[in-house]
Amino acid sequence: KAGVTQTPRYLIKTRGQQVTLSCSPISGHRSVSWYQQTPGQGLQFLFEYFSETQRNKGNFPGRFSGRQFSNSRSEMNVSTLELGDSALYLCASGPPGRGITDTQYFGPGTRLTVL
Amino acid sequence: QKEVEQNSGPLSVPEGAIASLNCTYSDRGSQSFFWYRQYSGKSPELIMFIYSNGDKEDGRFTAQLNKASQYVSLLIRDSQPSDSATYLCAVGRAGGTSYGKLTFGQGTILTVHP
């Protein structure tokens, strides 16, 4: 089974621009979670999508948004980029939940650099 | 108090030794516990998950969970230089506002020296 894929792998943007990152989950997985990883804050949860619906959202400003398509692929968008948005953005997919947070498998990540 | 805390590193062990990684969590409603390994420049890779109190073994890895003490650990037996990485403890709970959310510790850097 193919793993989680993320595109692009690397991005360089300037302040004020916007960016869209893409994630394709493992086949059959319908839950997609997004995380931001920085040296200072570690891994922080952004949001989770399941069946095209955002079920959960972390403590990030509204500039961070996402969506999920009917094939479970997901995108996240960051508008009005700030220097502090430079990070590794990780997508994780998981099987349908059983009422507790199920195992999540991470993609390779997108390294975003904001200049 | 951080939600998930891991023993401060870095941790250095000789090849062949047992590496012990510890993690405590503050949310008593936590129900799922995970250990991920992350090599430098790579994404986290799942090593173990555990839901019930006690021990769970998988090859050289043993996860231990004590919900009463809000403590989870990972033992790596016969440590190899290839085990050198950052180990992340992650905690999850039931649905509602916790859907799809894992809370991570800051990670422990493990170095296994020959």
Image (cartoon, coloured by chain):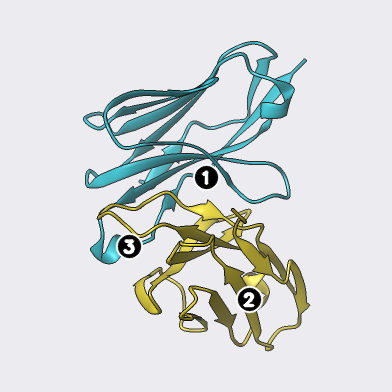
Chain colours: A yellow, B cyan
The number of numbered discs placed on residues in the rendered structure image is 3
Element on which disc 2 rests: strand
Task: Tell me which amino acid carries mark 3.
Answer: Tyr
Query: Residue at the spot x=59%, y=53% of the render?
Result: A1
Mark 2 — on which chain does it sit?
A: A
Report helix, strand or loop for mark 1.
loop
Q: Is residue A20 visible to the viewer in this orientation of the structure?
A: yes
Asked if residue A115 shows in the view, the reply is no
Q: Where is residue B106? Give x, y as percent.
A: 52, 45
Label 3, label 1: how many angstroms apart (C-alpha)? Answer: 21 Å
Up/down of B72 relative to A16, above or below: above
Residue A43's tag is none
Q: Are marks 2 and 1 on the same chain?
A: no
Query: Looking at the picture, how far across and down is residue B87, in whole percent?
Result: 56, 37
Q: Is residue A11 left or right of residue B91?
A: right
A11 left or right of B60? Answer: right
Q: Residue at x 72, y 44 (%)?
A: B40
Q: Residue placed farthest to the top in the image?
A: B16
Q: Earlier in the sequence, mark 3 or mark 1?
A: 3
Which amino acid, by three-letter code, is at mark 2?
Answer: Leu
Identified by mark 1, the residue type is: Gln
Question: Which residue is at the front of the view, A82 or A22?
Answer: A22
Per the image, the residue denoted by label 1 is: B106
The chain to which mark 1 is attached is: B
At 76% across and 73% down in the image, what residue appears?
A11
Residue identifier under label 3: B99
| Residue tagged 2 | A21
The chain carrying label 3 is B
What residue is shown at x 32% (from left), y 57% (from top)?
A97
Same chain for mark 3 and mark 1? The answer is: yes
